[in-house]
Image (cartoon, rainbow, N blue to C red):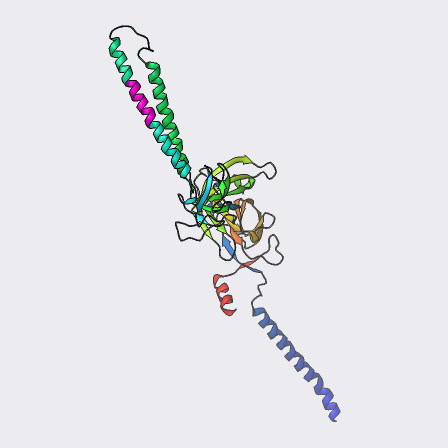
Amino acid sequence: MKKKWFKKILPLVILVIGIGGMNVIKASGEKEGEQEAVDIRPTVKVETAIAQDYQVQITSYGEVKPLESTMVSAQVSGEVLSWHSNFVPGGLVLRGDTLFTIEKDAYEAALLKAEADLSLAQANLIEEQARANVAKREAGSSKVSDLYLRKPQMLSAQASVKSAQARLKIAKRDLDNCAVKAPYDALVIQRNLGVGQYVNQGAQVGELYNIETAEVSFPIAGFDRDFLPADIAQKTAQITTKGHNAIVREGKISRDLGIIDQATRMSQLVVRIEDPYSLNSSQPPLKFGHYVEVSFAGKTLNQIYRLPQELVNNRIIWVLDENQEMQPQRVEVLREEGAYFLISEGLKDQDQLILTLPEYPQKGMKVKVAKPNDAQVNQQSS
């Protein structure tokens, strides 16, 4: 009896369960349809391209060298009596300092003799002048020879005076040269004499480097020549050493050497640095032999775009069009400068440059632009 009742109610139970299941499925389908579609577009950051005038910076390298060097020589012969305490390798001497002295007794005697000879010649000239005056008065209006008027004797006496004056001048010069002085503020490179040593006239006894002015000769590559300013002379340049305690000094471009190296196709410019050893300032000394970087302002380029190099790949950059789609754009790289490219063609103002590319960028790929607030939220959360 129970089995018959169960068989009769079973279809009804199955029908109720089926209707309930369909309602549940329908309800869940409606809920899924009500949910928003997931945006799977990659997120990118963009920046608006704006053309600007930009002054090129030209950089090169060179070695600091003295403007001039001098081999110090003895101008007269004699025994060395003394030398300056700084006249040693590495010493600094100032313009006019006495580097060393030579025994001068013989040259003082020569000066006295030259003065005596001049006095004697002047006395002879006075005497001949008097005789010539007497002869002229005696001749009166008569026509007489030059010999009678003692003109040859007068010329000879005048020549003797000039000769004595020349010898006196040489004697004074020789006496002055017994004290050899520094021709400029100098760094002593070497000294080859000592007290008591006899030196001959013209003997080289030392070497000096001028420290009033230094020079750096540096190459300019062919791709930089087009960006040199027209008024290159006296252009201010910055000279910088490398290393932990970098030295920064200012110089002036002095000249172009006027030739192009046949091997490297580079030209050479020269920059001058005043007071490199800082005798007259508190700046750190820039020593000869330092390898330095020289940088200065070149031409000003009008209406160009300065972009980080990582945005340019094989002269292609990516921009975002009005449909929020990525488009490749070929550009003309005018110059590479540090971590940037200077772009002359291929962009226009208000182009939207894509700064962060998806992993596999494609032409026409739809993307969404990151909001400024998104970056701030990400920074705070990190």
Look at the picture and state if 25 lies above or below 124: below
Q: Residue at x 38, y 28 (%)?
A: 166
Whole-percent x, y for residue 303 in the image = 47, 44
Residue 204 among those drawn in magenta? no
Whole-percent x, y for residue 190 in the image = 51, 46
Main structural element of the magenta stretch: helix, strand or loop?
Answer: helix
Q: Residue furthest top?
A: 142
The quarter of the picture where the N terminus appears is bottom right
Residue 60 seen in render: no
Depth check, front residue: 250 or 2: 250
Residue 126 among those drawn in magenta? yes
Depth check, front residue: 130 or 47: 130
Depth check, front residue: 66 or 125: 125
Task: Please state if 174 lies on the left or on the right of 13 as rendered.
Answer: left
Q: Residue at x 31, y 21 (%)?
A: 125
Whole-percent x, y for residue 334 in the image = 54, 43
Q: Residue furthest bottom?
A: 1
Depth check, front residue: 233 or 144: 144
Residue 253 seen in render: yes
Task: Please state if 336 lies on the left or on the right of 52 as rendered.
Answer: right
Look at the picture and state if 127 lies above or below 187: above
Q: Residue 102 appears in which quarter of the rendering? A: top left
Q: Residue at x 58, y 72 (%)?
A: 31
Q: Residue 124 appears in which quarter of the rendering? A: top left
Q: Which residues are magenta?
A: 119-129
Q: Residue at x 63, y 57 (%)?
A: 360
Whole-percent x, y for residue 38 in the image = 58, 65
